[in-house]
């Protein structure tokens, strides 16, 4: 009886594998994403001989010298720069500026070595037009090819130090069955490029498409193969761009890089705090300081309350988790006696910044209270602290760094937890509060919370 290839079904969203087809993926609950994948024997690439282990003490590590990508914001997110043999996966929405960012980085990297830019989506003339618009000073090698074997051969022949692949969904590998952009092809191509980087020390930068949910298209194992995963975020109709690291084997994953898209490409934003402040003194506005890695960023939270006539109030949030907003609204209703059950609540963080820190709770609660009372907060006032279910305001980390950033941008009053050990800073008034009720009472002395 002839041997048949083993058939599996793999979810194109999360990489879940099953022996049979299912309409709904049991892991990510996506519908009609299970695709057939037949395991085939790889021709001409079967390993020969026997693998031999070696003593760890005998291993000679690659030089860990950091190589600057030419942009301090990109170097910050990478952990200080690139490292030989590093594989970076960059994901983002179409038109967000992924190719532009990498082409600008290639211009700097080409000054010290050969950079091979592989494009499976654009022609060489299109890349040339973009390079002219960006004003590139150094020359790079361009290859418009989708066959992975030819890409590896060309990278070997040119002895490149940096290999850029745009994008991984267009690459075809003979080591796997299926069409380009299929689960098996994306995984096989990424694994082969990673193996090439580790064997030669070449830096490999890969562009990846994202799904409708904002995740990198392909199986989740794709992110486990590479060393660093970066996400380029922002509204493509606006100029602001945020670069985040969700995985980094050579640095922190808490850093964020801020860029602004212009006619000449990506421009670094050295002082992002000023970018996220509108400067308005109006009801429903409050300023807080969030930590993005080692960088303090001042952010403005705005809220709008409207009457609800249907008995089912809406809670809409942009930049703050909706579940966290609902929790804070419940605390304000119970502990601060603000009747919010009949109000639709809309919350927004200026500039598209996402606040994941609990230390921004107090600012969110105060901006809702301000909108409810239709009275602005005292001018040049910021709020820091986590709010608990009992209404208490809890301490936060890196308080001195946050306070110095508030002073630098002209804020002279900061509400903070009573338990926080804050240093005295010239020109700054500290208002320690134990509960959310005390914070509201301080801001509105004529309307104390009972």
Image (spheres, grey):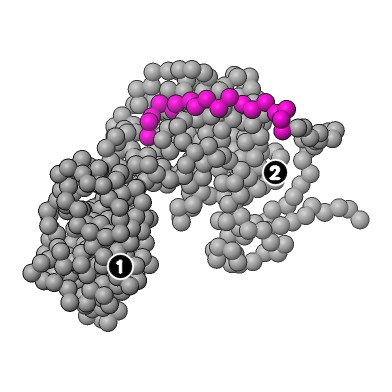
Which region of the structure is painted magenta?
56-73
Q: Which residue in the structure is indicated by mark 2?
A: 176
Q: Quadrant of residue 401?
A: top left
Nearest the viewer among 128 and 401 is: 401
State whether residue 267 is above or below residue 312: above
State whether residue 188 is above or below residue 17: above
The secondary element bearing badge 1 is classed as: loop
Packing grade of label 2 (10 A; few <14, some 14-19, many >=20) is many
Q: Can you tell which of label 2 and label 1 is closer to the viewer?
A: 1
Q: Position of residue 258 (x, y in %)?
A: 34, 40
Q: Position of residue 392 (x, y in %)?
A: 30, 67
Nearest the viewer among 368 and 40 is: 368
Helix, strand or loop: magenta stretch: loop
Mark linked to residue 392: 1
Q: Quadrant of residue 260?
A: top left
Q: Is residue 300 visible?
A: yes
Q: Quadrant of residue 8?
A: bottom right
Q: Quadrant of the C terminus?
A: bottom left
Which is more N-terminal, label 1 or label 2? 2
Q: Is residue 129 visible?
A: no
In 3D space, how far apart are the residues under numbered discs 2 and 1 (Cα atoms)?
57 Å
Q: Position of residue 17 (x, y in %)?
A: 67, 58
């Amino acid at each position: 009886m002839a041997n048949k290839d083993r058939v599996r079904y793999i979810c194109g969203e999360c990489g879940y594998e099953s022996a049979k087809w299912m309409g709904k993926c049991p892991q990510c609950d996506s519908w009609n994403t299970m695709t057939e994948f037949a395991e085939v024997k790889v021709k001409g690439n079967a390993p020969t001989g026997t693998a031999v282990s070696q003593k760890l003490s005998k291993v000679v590590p690659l030089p860990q010298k950091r190589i600057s990508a030419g942009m301090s914001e990109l170097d910050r997110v990478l952990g200080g720069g690139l490292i030989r043999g590093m594989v970076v996966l960059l994901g983002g929405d179409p038109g967000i500026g992924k190719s532009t960012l990498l082409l600008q980085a290639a211009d700097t990297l080409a000054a010290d070595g050969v950079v091979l830019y592989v494009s499976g989506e654009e022609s060489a003339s299109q890349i040339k037009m973009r390079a002219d618009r960006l004003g590139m000073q150094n020359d790079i090698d361009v290859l418009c090819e989708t066959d992975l074997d030819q890409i590896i051969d060309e990278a070997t022949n040119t002895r490149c130090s940096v290999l850029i692949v745009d994008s991984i969904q267009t690459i075809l590998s003979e080591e796997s069955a299926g069409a380009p952009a299929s689960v098996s092809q994306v995984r096989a191509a990424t694994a082969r490029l990673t193996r090439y980087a580790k064997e030669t020390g070449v830096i490999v930068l890969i562009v990846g498409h994202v799904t409708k949910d904002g995740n990198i298209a392909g199986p989740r194992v794709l992110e486990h193969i590479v060393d660093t995963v970066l996400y380029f975020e922002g509204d493509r109709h606006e100029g602001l761009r945020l670069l985040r690291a969700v995985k980094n084997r050579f640095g922190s994953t808490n850093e964020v890089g801020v860029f602004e898209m212009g006619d000449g490409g990506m421009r670094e934003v050295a002082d992002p705090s000023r970018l996220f402040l509108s400067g308005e003194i109006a009801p429903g506005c409050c300023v807080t300081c969030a930590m993005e890695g080692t960088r303090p960023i001042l952010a403005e939270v705005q809220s709008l309350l409207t009457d609800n006539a249907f008995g089912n109030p809406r809670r809409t949030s942009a930049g703050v988790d909706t579940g966290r907003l609902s929790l804070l609204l419940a605390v304000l209703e119970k502990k601060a006696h603000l009747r919010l059950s009949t109000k639709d609540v809309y919350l927004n963080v200026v500039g598209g910044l996402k606040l994941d820190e609990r230390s921004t709770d107090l600012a969110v609660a105060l901006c809702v209270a301000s909108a409810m009372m239709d009275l602005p907060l005292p001018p040049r006032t910021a709020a820091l602290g986590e709010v608990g279910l009992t209404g208490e305001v809890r301490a936060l980390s890196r308080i001195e760094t946050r306070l110095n950033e508030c002073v630098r941008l002209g804020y002279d009053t900061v509400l903070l937890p009573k338990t926080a050990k804050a240093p005295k800073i010239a020109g700054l008034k500290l208002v320690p509060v134990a509960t959310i009720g005390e914070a509201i009472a301080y801001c509105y002395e004529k309307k104390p919370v009972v």
